[in-house]
């Protein structure tokens, strides 16, 4: 069993990896995390990614990506915040969480969407998200990942153009301008 992380520098949210991180290039930030990170102080008037004040840095495995925090109002009193990220980071998350990505594709391939895919194929993966308030940097750590049952097969599948063609055909993913190579990304 994996031990809890020891080197946590900033307030942490452990986000369960779900299909939203693969489809929308964003994740809603729960209210309690907004409070902990003081998101409303920095981003209360950021209603669009085009607002320069919404831009943040996201660091994952020593790689830096661009991100944005936006606010949407459901009503006059209720504000919701979202953390958006680039296509490059979205592709990297698919590589890091191949089991969740494959489970998501399996669900989208099925005609009967009434089934709970997480109950049928049970495992959980988590993305640790820390926020450095002073420097406006989010730190992503893939700490809890599910090892593929067939690691060499999964390496080839995750890097295969056919898998990403299926993913694109199933919708939700606009063409990104990137192609897949075994073990990573490359410009097309």
Image: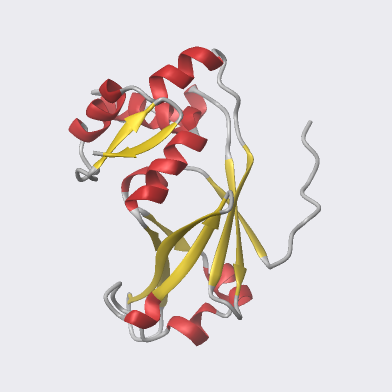
Residue 187 in the image: above or below residue 117:
below
Q: Residue at x 41, y 63 (%)?
A: 66
Q: Residue at x 33, y 22 (%)?
A: 160
Q: Which quadrant of the structure image shows residue 84? A: bottom left
Residue 111, percent from left and from top: 23, 23
Residue 71 in the image: above or below residue 4:
below
Decide if residue 83 is in sight here.
no
Decide if residue 86 is in sight here.
yes
Residue 36, percent from left and from top: 63, 74
In the picture, the quarter occupied by the C terminus is: top left
Left-right relation of 118 to 53: right
Left-right relation of 8 to 115: right
Q: Residue at x 54, y 58 (%)?
A: 59
Which is nearer the eye, 143 or 87? 87
Which is nearer the eye, 142 or 176? 176
Residue 165 in the image: above or below residue 15:
above
Looking at this rendering, what residue extends furthest in the front direction?
Answer: 187
Q: How is the image coloured?
A: secondary structure
Q: How many marks?
A: 0
Q: Residue at x 58, y 77 (%)?
A: 135
Which is nearer the eye, 76 or 59? 59
Residue 145, percent from left and from top: 61, 34
Left-right relation of 9 to 90: right
Q: Which quadrant of the structure image shows residue 104? A: top left
In the picture, the quarter occupied by the N terminus is: top right
Q: Which quadrant of the structure image shows residue 109? A: top left
């Amino acid at each position: 069993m994996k031990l809890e992380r020891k080197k946590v520098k900033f307030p942490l949210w452990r986000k369960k990896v779900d299909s939203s991180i693969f489809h929308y290039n964003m994740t809603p930030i729960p209210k309690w995390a907004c409070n902990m990170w003081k998101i409303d102080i920095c981003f209360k008037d950021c209603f669009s990614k085009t607002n320069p004040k919404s831009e943040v840095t996201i660091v994952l495995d020593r790689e830096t990506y661009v991100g944005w925090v936006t606010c949407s109002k459901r009503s006059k009193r209720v504000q919701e915040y979202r953390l958006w990220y680039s296509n490059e980071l979205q592709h990297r998350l698919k590589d890091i969480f191949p089991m969740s990505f494959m489970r998501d594709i399996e669900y989208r391939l099925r005609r009967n969407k009434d089934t709970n895919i997480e109950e049928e194929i049970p495992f959980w993966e988590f993305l640790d998200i820390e926020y450095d308030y002073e420097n406006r940097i989010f730190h992503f750590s893939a700490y809890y990942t599910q090892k593929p049952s067939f690691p060499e097969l999964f390496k080839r599948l995750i890097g295969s153009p056919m898998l990403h063609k299926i993913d694109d055909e199933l919708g939700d993913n606009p063409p990104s301008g990137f192609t897949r190579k075994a073990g990573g990304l490359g410009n097309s």
